[in-house]
Amino acid sequence: MLQVIWTLLVPEKLSSNNKGAHVLDGEIFIRTQAGDFPSRGWKDQPVVVMQNLIATTLQLANTRNAQKRYFPFGPYYLEIDVPVKDLLTIHFMRSYLPEPLESLPPVTLPFVKYCHILLQSGYTMLEACRSKGIGTRLELEALEKSLVLLNEAVVKQ
């Protein structure tokens, strides 16, 4: 099981002059059967994180000579292995000296299923932002473009 869980903190005072003018803060984290990563209620900028997570996934989908990818969450990060036989393994890590520690057991799932999880969560987030009239034009356009490209990459799989 893998889910991307997010909430958006809507700025309290939205007038017609400043609607959509705020980079959105909120919570975003990944839920697995073993727990939440980095932790439940992780504070960040959900739209930006989602767009970057999709961009990282696109690098794996569109590159013949793909390499392991890293996705930061503060002192935590995802280590995403190159898909092998259409299976993707995600490691949930915490930066720590002398070497990183695994925060949760790794999750292996079909690459296309992982893409569908991101697409579903990303499109729901985009729709929520647009229906509330929140988020900057730049971050929403970047998210939408990433979603379109990921959807095209999944169709080619």
Image: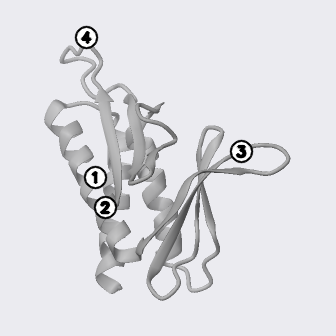
List x then y, in percent, for residue 68: 63, 70
Of the numbered discs in the image, which one, if any, rests on residue 117?
2
Mark 2 residue element:
helix
First reached walking from the N terminus: tag 2 or tag 4: 4
Identify the residue under disc 1: 121
Q: Residue 94: name its quadrant.
A: top right
Residue at 34 percent across and 34 percent down: it is 136
Q: Amino acid at mark 1?
A: Ser
Q: CA distance from mark 1 to mark 2?
A: 6 Å
First reached walking from the N terminus: tag 3 or tag 4: 4
Q: Residue 116: name its quadrant.
A: bottom left
Q: CA distance from mark 2 to mark 3?
A: 26 Å
List x then y, in percent, for residue 22: 36, 25
Front label number (2 vs 3):
3
Front label number (3 vs 1):
3
Front label number (3 vs 4):
3
Identify the residue under disc 3: 95
Proximity of marks 2 and 3: CB atoms separated by less than 8 Å:
no
Q: CA distance from mark 3 to mark 1?
A: 27 Å
Q: Amino acid at mark 2?
A: Ile
Identify the residue under disc 4: 13
Q: Residue 111: name its quadrant.
A: bottom left
Quadrant where the N terminus lies? bottom left
First reached walking from the N terminus: tag 1 or tag 4: 4
First reached walking from the N terminus: tag 3 or tag 1: 3
Label 1: few (<14), some (14–19) or many (≥20) C-alpha neighbours in 10 Å:
some
